[in-house]
Image (spheres, rainbow, N blue to C red):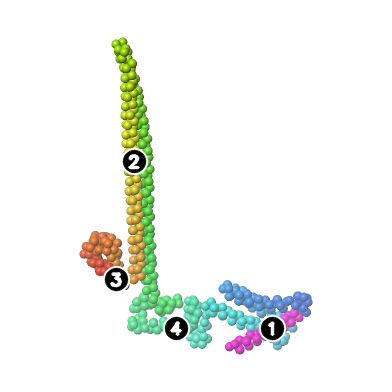
Amino acid sequence: MITLSIVAIVGSVAVGLIGFVMSYDTLRGVAEDDWEFGPDLAKWFPIGVDASILAFLALDLVLIRRGVPWPLLRLVAHAMTLATVWFNASAHGSITEDTTRAAAHGLMPILFVVGIEAARRLVVQAARLETGTAMDRVPLHRWLLAPWPTVRLYRRMRLCGITSYPEMIARDRDLMGYRQWLARKHGGDLRAADPDALLPMEMARYGISVDQALALPERQEQAAADRATARRRRLLALETQREVDAMRAKAEQAIAAGDLRVAQAEADGRAAEAESEADARATAAQRAAQRERDLEETAAMREAKARQAAADAAAKEAAAKEAEAEQRRLHAARSAADDRARLERAAADEALARKEKQQHLTDIAEADLRRAEAEEAAAEARLRAKEIEVAALEAEDLARLGQSERKVRKVARLITAEAGGKPELLPLARIREVLAVSSDGTASTYRTEAAAYLAAQAQEQAQHAA
């Protein structure tokens, strides 16, 4: 093969060079002598004609390699090939006058173009093999021996994109064998066959093999089951997200309400404190005014008595005045002490009331915070339960469990989550609600089977741990 390739390459290059040189010399001479191109342009005319063939064919190969072929380039290259053959053949007179001379001048350009076309076919085939688009040819003897079936076979190959001729023959044989088997199975009447069994004959026109056609119903059922599972998961995820959003909104609302109550309580406390302080100040002012009036009245009365007694007891005036002054001082001091004591008791009572109000507000805020935390923890627990439920459903879908087994495992999860792993603590009403059953006997049966399932799981885990 290497020797043949070397001989082909060397021979093609030699033929191409000889053809190009002969075409160049012929076209240059006729362009200068007969077509009046002039000496300078006559040198470039043959290069433009022959080089255009190489350029257009090479560009056509580049576009094919890039996957954007343009058939116009090849048509132009073929037109230039016909032109150079015509120019060479008619360069020394009419073709009909001396056909031998015309053939001699046109032969080498024809061989030159044939070599280029052979190289083009090789490059195109290599590109198709690389991209997997190379199409096998149908043998000539098949066209001659069975023309009409061959036309149908070739049409299916092209329409279905089947590039291998042996693969197409094998598919036809499998289809024929299956048809014969199905006819024998139903006594020669294919109409009695199941529609799924007729799929290979129906789908053959679309390039689908017998095995692929028979597997279509199962694939479609599996695809439908997968779509249903995906839809169920999306709905469950959407429901879970809605519940989570509702719980979060409720928790935020509770927190906001608690903050509002705290702010309202603080405002009420400040208002009560200001009101108490104003009342205390008003009471103190009233008491002071009353003491002043009492003092004035007492002084006036004592002054009148003193004046009356002054006439009878002049000797005792100084002592009486001194005793009276001392008594006034003692009374005033005692009254002031009583007022201070009352003010201190009022201030202490007011401080105690503020402290009790503040403690009450703190207790309310702490209770609201604990309630919000409890609701958030409950929401997180329900979210984890939903996630566990989704994971369990996915595992059950993968395991392809039946409806009864799924219900048993669902009850087992309820026992673990709500009854602390003790089946007898899970009420039958709860099982009826979750499984949508109306009988306590059915619910009890599911609870018994779920307990057995949990016991088997525990035993299996203990064996693994051992």
| Observer-nearest of 296 and 337 | 337
Instruction: State how many labels appear.
Output: 4
Q: Is 386 left, or right, of 127 in this rendering?
A: left
Q: Which residues are magenta?
A: 1-30
122 inside magenta stretch: no
| Between 351 and 20, the one nearer to me in the picture | 351
Where is mark 2, residue-wise? 355
Task: Kindly report the distance in space between the C-alpha atoms of the residues bearing marks 3 and 2.
Answer: 59 Å
Residue beneath disc 1: 17
Image height of 270 relative to 143, above or below: above
Q: Amino acid at mark 1?
A: Leu
Query: Which residue has dot 4 on it?
Result: 170
Quadrant housing residue 217: bottom left
How far separated are the C-alphas under marks 2 and 1?
A: 115 Å
Identify the image quadrant of the N terminus: bottom right
- First in sequence, mark 4 or 1: give its number: 1
Q: Is residue 4 magenta?
A: yes
Discs 3/2, front: 2
- Give the number of the mark in front: 3 or 4: 3
Label 3 belongs to which residue? 462
Q: Residue at x 36, y 36 (%)?
A: 273
Q: Earlier in the sequence, mark 4 or mark 2?
A: 4
Task: Work out which residue is located at the far left of the displayed protein and give it.
Answer: 441
Residue 445 horizontal/vertical position (percent) = 23, 66
Name the image quarter holding the C terminus: bottom left
Mark 4: which secondary structure? Answer: helix
Distance (Cα) linking label 3 and label 1: 88 Å
Q: Where is residue 105? Give x, y as percent.
A: 71, 85
- Residue sitting at 68 percent across and 77 percent down? 51
